[in-house]
Image: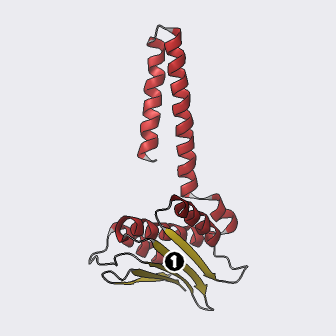
Amino acid sequence: MHDGVAAMIAAAKMSLQSIPHLEDEEKKNQQLDKLSALLGNTHHEVRRIAHDLLPVVLEKEGLVAALHHFAAALNQMGMIQIIIETHLQADFRLPKRTDLMLYRIIQELINNILKHAQATNVQITFANTNDHFTITVVDNGIGYLQESEGQGLYSIRQRLQALGGRFDIHGGENIGTKVVLQIW
């Protein structure tokens, strides 16, 4: 569970334990109000984490719809502009397990872009042919220069291999980065 939630629960427990030791009824009521607010915030945070683990829209509507929601939330923050382009048939759907793994992969790619690329724009393109499904993620950042594979890229590689796929990274200094994910 997220460290923030654990800290909030610990704070709520300490707050609750302090109430019997308060002699003034008004202070007890104030402490209960604070505890109620803290538990409300904790509840909100747990729901947010649960949503991040498996967004409802991913389960109901699939990968592309879930990524539209994810991108809209990031776009609204104004830190980056994400555009999603699809070249898929209207009824195209992947198995739920594949949807979830690809959703996590794209989240990791976006996270890497936000942390390292200094990009302002990202384009995610979905396409499929008779024999494979492709997702292309292109940013306008400083380019991919890392010589060793970090934990995020290792995780992406492992997830794609589990799906029978692979990925390639193309980029250089000041030309942005292009990541191509393919599943057969």
Above or below: residue 36 compared with residue 64: above
Image coords of residue 59 (percent x, y): 65, 63
Amino acid type shown at disc 1: Gln
Above or below: residue 61 compared with residue 10: below
Image coords of residue 78 (percent x, y): 50, 61
User: Is residue 135 rendered to the left or right of residue 108?
Assistant: right
Residue closer to the observer: 34 or 118: 118
Residue closer to the observer: 76 or 171: 76
Q: Which quadrant of the figure has residue 111?
A: bottom left
Q: Residue at x 48, y 23 (%)?
A: 16
Return the residue found at the far left.
Answer: 147
Above or below: residue 28 compared with residue 75: above
Residue closer to the observer: 26 or 104: 26
Image coords of residue 178 (percent x, y): 43, 82
User: Is residue 61 rendered to the left or right of residue 72?
Assistant: right
Tell me the element at label 1: strand
Q: Is disc 1 surrounded by few (<14), some (14 to 19) or many (20+) residues within 10 Å?
A: some
Q: Residue at x 27, y 75 (%)?
A: 148
Q: Residue at x 48, y 13 (%)?
A: 20
Q: Which residue is mark 1?
A: 123
Return the residue found at the far bottom.
Answer: 130
Q: Which quadrant of the figure has residue 92?
A: bottom right
User: Is residue 145 rendered to the left or right of residue 6?
Assistant: left
Count of numbered labels shown in the rendering: 1
Q: Residue at x 41, y 71 (%)?
A: 119
Image coords of residue 122 (percent x, y): 48, 74
* Quadrant into which the C terminus falls: bottom right
